Image (cartoon, rainbow, N blue to C red):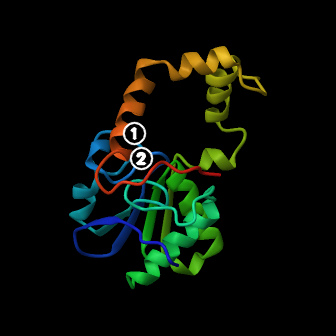
Amino acid sequence: NGTDIHYVEAGKGEPLLLLHGGLVSTNPIWAGHPGGWVSHVDTFAEHFRVIAPDTRGHGRTANPGGGPIAFTQLADDVVALIDALGLDRPMICGFSDGGMTTTMVGIQSPESVRAIVNYAGYDMLNPKAPSFTMMRQMLGGSPEATKADPVMVEGTFASQEMHGFFDRMKADHDAPGAVSLQALT
């Protein structure tokens, strides 16, 4: 569909697409982080032909034309990758934003895939999910918050855990061949 999608591939057998979470990529810098699949590719490759793309605007896959990136566009990209690689109804598994994309592939093009695993992406489709309460607490100051509290936001993003994430994210996006971070919608 006009997008050059960077991906890593390993193993043989039935195809399995692994979609990373938002703000991360297939860069080995994400080993050990739950948002990326880097630490798991070799294990999956013992049983499957693993294809792990950098989604549009992440890692080494650009966002042609710039602008916000919708999950529907990411799903279109995945279907285009499936077609370009000649995959016969692969299984796809996505984490967080990758889970949302995986779900959108299933909604938009159910004939394109054999099985879907939405790992930690379901919460975005379920406003009663515990993660919504956690985010309200972290960014709004209470489980019932309906707007952000700047003091809470600053405290959340100033934590040591977030500093480590941001340092890793900056190193990923500064890596040779990487694209600059893009907006997601």
For label 1, the SS is helix
Q: Position of residue 99 (x, y in %)?
A: 53, 54
Q: Is residue 105 above or below residue 94?
A: below
Query: Which residue: 71% across, 18% down?
Result: 142
Q: Nearer the viewer, mark 2 or mark 1?
A: 1
Q: Name the residue nearer the viewer: 62 or 101.
A: 62
Q: Can you see residue 1?
A: yes
Q: Quadrant of residue 164?
A: top left
Q: Is residue 156 above or below residue 174?
A: above
Dots 2 and 1: beta carbons under 8 Å? Answer: yes
Badge 1 density bin: few <14, some 14–19, many ≥20, Cα 10 Å: some
**Three-letter amino acid code of the residue under disc 2:** Val
Query: Which residue: 68% across, 19% down?
Result: 150
Q: Is residue 99 left or right of residue 178?
A: right
For label 2, the SS is loop
**Three-letter amino acid code of the residue under disc 1:** Met
Q: Position of residue 146 (x, y in %)?
A: 79, 27
Q: Quadrant of residue 163?
A: top left
Q: Position of residue 37 (x, y in %)?
A: 34, 51
Q: Is residue 89 above or below residue 173?
A: below
Badge 2 density bin: few <14, some 14–19, many ≥20, Cα 10 Å: many
Q: Quadrant of residue 152?
A: top right
What residue did someone put label 1 on? 169
Q: Which mark is residue 24?
A: 2
Query: Alpha-carbon distance for marks 2 and 1?
Result: 7 Å
Q: Name the residue nearer the viewer: 184 or 143.
A: 184
Q: Is residue 97 left or right of residue 145?
A: left
